[in-house]
Amino acid sequence: MASRMGMVRIALVLASAFFTAEGAKKFRLRAHRAGHFPREPIHPFSVPNELTQIHMLISAFQDGDRCANTINRALDKARYPDRLSFNVLQAIGPRDVACLEEFRLKLLPKLCSEQSMDCEAATLARIHVWTIPLKEAKGPAHQRGLLSERAILPGQDS
């Protein structure tokens, strides 16, 4: 657990975020120590580019159709859809629509209609879905916690 001073420092760093003069809605963080305000910004670990992976964690409660539409919309709107990967935890009952099946059967064929032959297989390989019974569902924050423990990221063994 972070110390109180550490939490204060985090708050100061976040409070010092500001928009750059270019107006591109980019922000820089400045490191602060008590009573000291340096001029050097804190730089990101890496600069995002067209190879940067994007991982989406989706917590779904029964609504498999909405979950499938979220995956479809993300892939359809992405400038670099091959960079996207999905980890989904769905609380599901016996009569509920399953997210992955809804996506695979109804949305994926259209999404891949003008793509290469292996589009469907390559897309499905980047979607990892777990389900839990409705009785075990304790809300989206709990599900995202469970999901972050199970998440499979590109480059990891599954």
Image (cartoon, grey):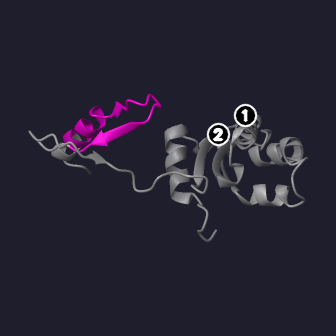
Residue 59 falls in which quadrant of the image? Answer: top right
Q: Nearer the viewer, residue 90 or 80?
A: 80
User: How far across and how far down the image is residue 147, in percent?
Assistant: 55, 52
Tally the numbered discs: 2
Check if residue 30 falls in the magenta segment.
yes
Pick the residue in front: 96 or 129: 129
Is 27 or 155 nearer to us in this picture? 27
- Which numbered mark, 1 or 2, is in the foreground of this view? 1
Find residue 97 and report its horizontal and vertical position in percent.
79, 40
Q: Is residue 116 left or right of residue 27?
A: right
Report if residue 55 is visible in the image. yes
What's the CA distance linking mark 1 and mark 2?
8 Å
CA neighbours of label 2 inside 10 A, class few (<14), some (14 to 19), many (20+): many
Dot 1 and dot 2 residues touching (CB under 8 Å):
yes
**Dot 1 amino acid type:** Arg
Q: Is residue 126 above or below residue 27?
A: below
Stretch of the chain drawn in magenta: 8-31
Judging by the rendered image, the residue that carries numbered circle 2 is 60
User: Helix or strand or loop: what does disc 1 sit on?
Assistant: helix
- The residue indicated by pointer 1 is 66
Amino acid under disc 2: Ala
Number of other residues with Cα within 10 Å of mark 1, as a class: few under 14, some 14 to 19, many 20 or more? some
Question: Which of pointers 1 and 2 lies earlier in the amino acid sequence?
Answer: 2
